[in-house]
């Protein structure tokens, strides 16, 4: 006991001394520590703790500026107050200035059942986008918790994500539960403020309502291989498009996905994935207008199955992305829906009332985009996205139940496409200003020329960069 | 069906063909910790180094290969002090590996073994990309390496108790060689005392302090911000009144700004290896310090 105190005192004195004299002392101390280790293995931990404390003291004595440090920063008297366990908090501020040649209120993706998400362009002129508030922390050694709330410009609060994630499952398994962004596709799990363009690609808008967030559980397994191989499965309530709220026990939607990734040399990293999702929408509704201009309530009940393939490749010289880098990303989606469509004009023209018949659709879409950082802070990017109308079988029209194609204007045959250019400037990794131009042919027979100026600011805890 | 079966068989065969990981599987966030782990673990360790000397350790992405390697690691050796805050938490979260989570013995942070310098009085990003815990670039002071070696050896012994004696023996031998080398470096570096230099980023602060050099400016206007024309012009003006002997940058920094200043201020531009692998000669930690000193000493001649 005495010896330990002596050593600790010696250490404290040695480290408090002027710098040049330290090294001989240090060597002596280290020798003593090593000797002590031979016989006193159990004491070592305590001793090193004391060493660290002594160093902390010495460090404080060294710089006069250090005196101004708060007592909590270092030192033996460190107390763990409740606030030391506060979750990491970060806040995203976003806004846009939008100028569009078409009225954003008439936005539609003709040929495709509306996905219900907020997929249209932002309102014209100045507008606030979602303000995102994130809390995250390890809950205990077994779980991590994350909550992300979106404060919408309409002054509402939406829970984007609120989930727990396991930290201690063995053999490469991770379980997530709560509300979270699905692991299908590539961009789906990436938060909107980290996207390379102001809005989502058309296939996301048409088939996933912008992105798929769901309430459920997700199990992932990472293979113990040097190459990245990850498999995942999700069970969810399935109430997000292409599913719908069902008011039923059990599982409404499920998905599986697999990712494969790795490096090519030092400069290139890649990831590819395949995903499959199924959902059973029950009375999934959307509003349309019949040929007389009266309101129609359509609803679909049946099965929806979605396949997705994704690939992303990132290149930077020697893997150092600070100066220049290039990112190539593309995804393909195919959505098949089979079931019954109900057409109800009783709230409008009231010519046919409610009629039902089969409905099936087999539609697809893809996008490819490249983003190039040509000098520090500056990036430019181009995206092409398109949808294929595919085959749509509408029993109500085909079997002559009354309503004709003109009474389903939203399902008119159309292959939407869009070209987008963007330029952004990021003074630091916490701020970004973006200029984006798009020539959008989502609507049948009309091209929307869109110009967006967007800002994204990130406050608080440093977010991690998802690949 | 047949094809997918074939694929599975090939995959299984390929997995089986991967070399079995013997001993301690170590994931080093930066090359310096990979090199240190190699010294301490010897053939008992299989070491994967996540980044290279040509990559900016602040700006790494949690790319798939890192996640895959972290999955099987027994011990992760990082710098800490928020240096890897942009990627390591994601790698940990996605690794499905409970051994390497924060707070577990399998997660080692070098900066925790030391008292850091340049701890900001307040953490405010208007000061640039400051680290609230202090300057994390701790490895360019030999005494820091020695302290970290002692702690890392203990951690290796804790994670892999069966080979504890081996780690301690190797560490003892390493520290012996390191002490001799440190003494030599201090002697060789004596002429550098008081030498004023311009740095690129404040990633050489521990080196500057150890050798008693003086940092009279940095090419970055604020930590983490790229050099700007205005700032460089201002720096050039300051150097006219308060001259420096050299512009010093790390291997991963863009050479252009240093070159620009070097030509106008008529002082040499030096590229230091910064870490293991940064130059041909910096093949291990000893080579790193040898080469760093040689390069700095060219200025005094």
Image (tube, rainbow, N blue to C red):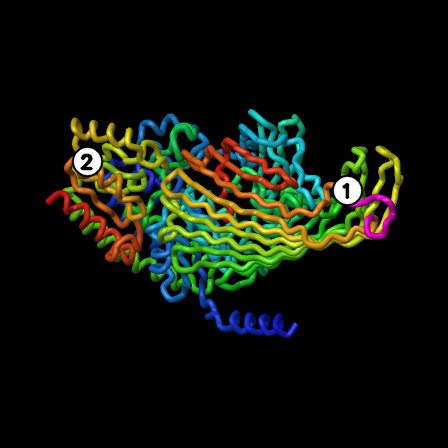
Displayed quadrant of residue B245: top left
B296 w.r.t. B129: above or below:
below
* Alpha carbons under labels 1 and 2: distance apart: 80 Å
Tell me which segment is drawn in magenta.
Answer: A397-405
Name the one closer to the observer, A401 or A157. A401
Crowding near pointer 1: few (<14 within 10 Å), some, many (20+)?
Answer: some
The local secondary structure at tag 2 comes to strand
Report the magenta stretch's main SS: loop
Q: Which residue, as the protein is rendered here, is positioned at the far left? A: B301
**Magenta run includes residue A400:** yes
In the rendered structure, the residue with mark 1 lies on which chain?
A
A65 and A276: which is toward the camera:
A276
Q: Mark 2 = which residue?
A: B196
Does residue A54 appear left or right of residue A152 in this picture?
left
Label 1, secondary structure: give it. helix
Task: Left or right? Give the position of A365 relative to B74.
Answer: right
Respond whether the residues carrying marks 1 and 2 are from the same subunit: no
Q: Is residue A343 left or right of residue A208?
A: right
User: Percent x, y for residue B173?
Assistant: 30, 60
> x, y percentage for residue A94?
54, 31
Residue A270 appears anywhere in the view: yes
Residue A28: in magenta span = no
Which image quadrant for residue A131? Answer: top right
Q: Where does the image place residue A370, in percent across and percent down from the top left?
A: 47, 48
Q: Which residue has dot 1 on it?
A: A406
Q: Look at 13% across and 43% down and name the residue there.
A: B300
């Amino acid at each position: 006991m005495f010896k330990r105190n002596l050593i600790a005192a010696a250490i404290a004195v040695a480290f408090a001394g002027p710098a040049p004299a330290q090294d001989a002392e240090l060597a002596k101390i280290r020798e003593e520590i090593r000797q002590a280790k031979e016989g006193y293995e159990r004491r070592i931990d305590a001793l090193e703790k004391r060493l660290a404390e002594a160093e902390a003291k010495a460090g404080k004595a060294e710089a006069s500026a250090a005196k101004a440090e708060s007592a909590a920063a270092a030192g033996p008297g460190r107390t763990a107050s409740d606030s030391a366990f506060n979750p990491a908090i970060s806040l995203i501020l976003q806004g846009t200035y939008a100028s569009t040649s078409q009225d954003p209120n008439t936005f539609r993706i003709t040929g495709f059942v509306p996905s219900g998400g907020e997929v249209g362009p932002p309102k014209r002129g100045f507008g606030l986008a979602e303000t995102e508030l994130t809390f995250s922390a390890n809950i205990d050694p077994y779980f991590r918790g994350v909550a992300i709330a979106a404060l919408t410009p309409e002054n509402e609060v939406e829970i984007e994500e609120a989930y727990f994630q396991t930290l201690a499952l063995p053999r490469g398994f991770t379980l997530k539960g709560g509300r979270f962004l699905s692991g299908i596709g590539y961009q789906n799990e990436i938060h909107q403020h980290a996207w390379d363009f102001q809005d989502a690609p058309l296939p996301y808008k048409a088939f996933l309502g912008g992105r798929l967030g769901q309430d459920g559980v997700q199990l992932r397994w990472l293979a113990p291989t040097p190459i990245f191989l990850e498999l995942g499965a999700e069970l969810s309530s399935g109430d997000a498009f292409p599913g719908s709220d069902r008011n039923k026990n059990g599982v409404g939607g499920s998905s599986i996905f697999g990712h494969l990734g790795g490096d090519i040399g030092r400069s290139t990293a890649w990831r590819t994935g395949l995903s499959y999702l199924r959902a059973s929408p029950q009375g999934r509704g959307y509003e349309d207008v019949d040929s007389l201009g009266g309101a129609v309530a359509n609803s679909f009940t049946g099965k929806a199955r979605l396949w997705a393939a994704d690939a992303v490749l990132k290149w930077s010289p020697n893997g150092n992305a600070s100066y220049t880098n290039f990112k190539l990303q593309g995804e393909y989606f195919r959505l098949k829906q089979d079931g019954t469509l109900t057409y109800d004009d009783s709230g409008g023209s009231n010519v046919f009332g409610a009629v039902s018949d089969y409905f099936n659709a087999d539609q697809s879409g893809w996008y490819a985009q490249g983003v190039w950082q040509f000098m520090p802070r500056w990036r430019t990017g181009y995206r092409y996205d398109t949808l294929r109308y595919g085959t749509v079988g509408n029993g109500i029209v085909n079997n002559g139940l009354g309503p004709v194609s003109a009474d389903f204007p939203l399902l008119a045959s159309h292959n939407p496409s869009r070209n987008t250019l963007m330029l952004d400037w990021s003074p630091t990794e916490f701020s970004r200003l973006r200029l984006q131009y798009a020539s959008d042919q989502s609507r049948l027979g009309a091209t929307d020329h869109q110009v967006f100026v967007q800002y994204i600011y990130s406050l608080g805890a440093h977010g991690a960069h998802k690949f | 069906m047949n094809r997918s079966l074939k694929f599975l068989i090939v995959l299984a065969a390929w997995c089986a063909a991967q070399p079995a990981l013997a001993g301690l599987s170590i994931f080093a966030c930066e090359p310096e910790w990979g090199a240190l782990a190699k010294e301490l673990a010897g053939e008992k360790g299989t070491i994967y180094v996540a980044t290279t000397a040509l990559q900016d350790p602040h700006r790494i992405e949690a790319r798939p290969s890192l996640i895959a390697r972290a999955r099987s690691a027994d011990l992760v050796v990082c710098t800490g002090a928020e240096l890897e805050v942009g990627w390591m938490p994601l790698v940990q979260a996605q690794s499905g590996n409970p051994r390497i989570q924060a707070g577990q013995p399998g997660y080692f942070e070098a900066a925790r073994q030391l008292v850091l310098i340049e701890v900001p009085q307040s953490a405010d990003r208007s000061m640039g990309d400051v680290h609230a815990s202090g300057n994390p670039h701790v490895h360019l002071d030999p005494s820091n390496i020695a302290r970290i070696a002692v702690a890392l050896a203990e951690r290796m012994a804790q994670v892999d108790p069966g080979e504890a004696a081996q780690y301690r023996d190797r560490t003892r031998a390493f520290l012996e060689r390191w002490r001799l080398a440190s003494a030599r470096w201090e002697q060789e570096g004596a002429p550098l005392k008081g030498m004023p230099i311009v740095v690129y980023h404040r990633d050489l602060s521990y080196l500057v302090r150890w050798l008693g050099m003086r940092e009279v400016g940095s090419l970055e206007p604020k930590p983490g911000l790229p050099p700007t024309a205005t700032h460089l012009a201002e720096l050039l003006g300051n150097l006219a009144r308060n001259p420096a002997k050299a512009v010093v940058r790390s291997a991963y920094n863009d050479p252009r700004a240093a070159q620009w200043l070097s030509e106008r201020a008529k002082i040499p531009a030096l590229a230091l290896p910064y870490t293991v692998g940064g130059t041909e000669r910096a093949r291990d930690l000893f080579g790193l310090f040898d080469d760093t000193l040689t390069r700095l000493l060219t200025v005094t001649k």
